[in-house]
């Protein structure tokens, strides 16, 4: 692995789930550098974001829950097709649980809000959703759902009379859609598949146990303490028992994991179990 590589960051996250003395021995055995200081992690993030694809929708939401204008501006660049989140960011809508009022907006964002749909101007929030007859129209109408009050208004309207399918779909793949409302929109396998394609997960446990390849997920989690600390702890709690059972203090198992991680296509639990089994 090259210095400061994605693989080093990924393995470093897993090493954070075992005792420091074990992690130290593994680093000496494999040549991995020491763990990165939190302030260096944040600085690296602000300088350049190197992830190869757009953020999974739920990960973007977990970062937005900090209600940090600087982080919101970073997320903005990685959600170009999510007009709803972009509109909320540009308007200073808070995402943190229980937070109300308007939060500061990064100076680069005012005036960049996506265009307001004509149907919303003519028919209002619920009316524009009832007019939806295509996915594009659904996304446009759904982009005007911004606050918790908006979500419950939409949920009540759907309960009174189901919204068009495209509208339900567009609303459900918004990562900030409340779980109770999303559940009312559908639960069949095709619906669940659409959520996964959009990068929407019930929480970090589902993200780390279902998404792959492992190196991509672990790269995200390696920045978790800087970007989504509460959610990162949930991911750690899910993976810690697995890492301790299959890797633990077995330096050879860790060495195998280092060799596998850059080419392994499965999810993180599969990577950990495979490395332990080979060793």
Image: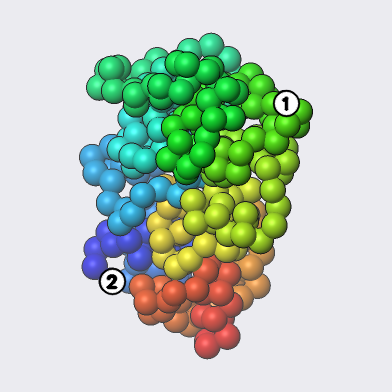
- Residue that label 2 marks: 1
**Image point (24%, 44%), residue name:** 48
Task: Tell me, yes or no, if residue 94 can be seen here.
Answer: no
Image vertical order of residue 31 relative to residue 107, above or below: below
> Which residue appears farthest toward the top when viewing the image?
101
**Image point (32%, 61%), residue name:** 6
Quarter of the image for the N terminus: give it: bottom left
User: In this view of the protein, which residue sits in the foreground, 195 or 89?
Assistant: 195
Tell me the crowding category of disc 2: few under 14, some 14 to 19, or many 20 or more residues within 10 angstroms, Cα based. Answer: few
- Label 2, label 1: how many angstroms apart (C-alpha)? 53 Å
Task: Tell me, yes or no, if residue 117 can be seen here.
Answer: yes
User: In this view of the protein, which residue sits in the foreground, 109 or 164?
Assistant: 164
Of labels 2 and 1, the one closer to you: 1
Q: How is the image coloured?
A: rainbow
- x, y percentage for residue 31? 33, 71
Lower sequence index among marks 2 and 1: 2
User: Which of the numbered marks, if any, corresponds to residue 156?
Assistant: 1
Q: Secondary structure at mark 1?
A: helix
**Image point (48%, 20%), residue name:** 120
Q: Secondary structure at mark 2?
A: loop
Image vertical order of residue 188 relative to residue 231, above or below: below
User: In this view of the protein, which residue sits in the foreground, 50 or 166?
Assistant: 166
């Amino acid at each position: 692995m090259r210095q400061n590589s994605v693989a080093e960051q990924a393995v470093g996250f897993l090493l954070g789930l075992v005792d420091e003395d074990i992690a130290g021995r593994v680093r000496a055995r494999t040549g991995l550098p020491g763990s990165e200081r939190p302030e260096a992690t944040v600085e690296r993030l602000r300088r350049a974001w190197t992830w190869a694809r757009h953020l999974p929708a739920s990960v973007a939401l977990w970062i937005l829950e900090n209600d940090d204008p600087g982080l919101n501006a970073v997320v903005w660049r990685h959600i170009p097709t999510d007009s709803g989140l972009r509109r909320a960011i540009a308007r200073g809508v808070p995402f943190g649980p229980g937070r109300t009022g308007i939060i500061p907006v990064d100076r680069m964002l005012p005036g960049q809000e996506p265009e307001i749909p004509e149907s919303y101007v003519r028919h209002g929030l619920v009316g524009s959703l009832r007019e939806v007859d295509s996915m594009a129209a659904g996304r446009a109408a759904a982009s005007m759902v911004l606050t918790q009050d908006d979500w419950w208004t939409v949920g009540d309207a759907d309960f009174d009379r189901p919204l068009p399918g495209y509208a339900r779909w567009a609303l459900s793949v918004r990562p900030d859609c409340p779980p109770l409302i999303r559940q009312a929109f559908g639960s069949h396998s095709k619906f669940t598949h659409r959520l996964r394609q959009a990068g929407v997960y019930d929480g970090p446990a589902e993200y780390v146990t279902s998404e792959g390849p492992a190196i991509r997920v672990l790269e995200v989690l390696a920045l978790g303490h800087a970007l989504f600390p509460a959610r990162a702890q949930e991911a750690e709690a899910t993976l810690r028992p697995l890492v301790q059972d299959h890797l633990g203090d077995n330096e050879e198992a860790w060495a195998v994991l280092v060799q596998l991680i850059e080419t392994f296509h499965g999810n993180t639990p599969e990577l950990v179990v495979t490395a332990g089994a080979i060793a």
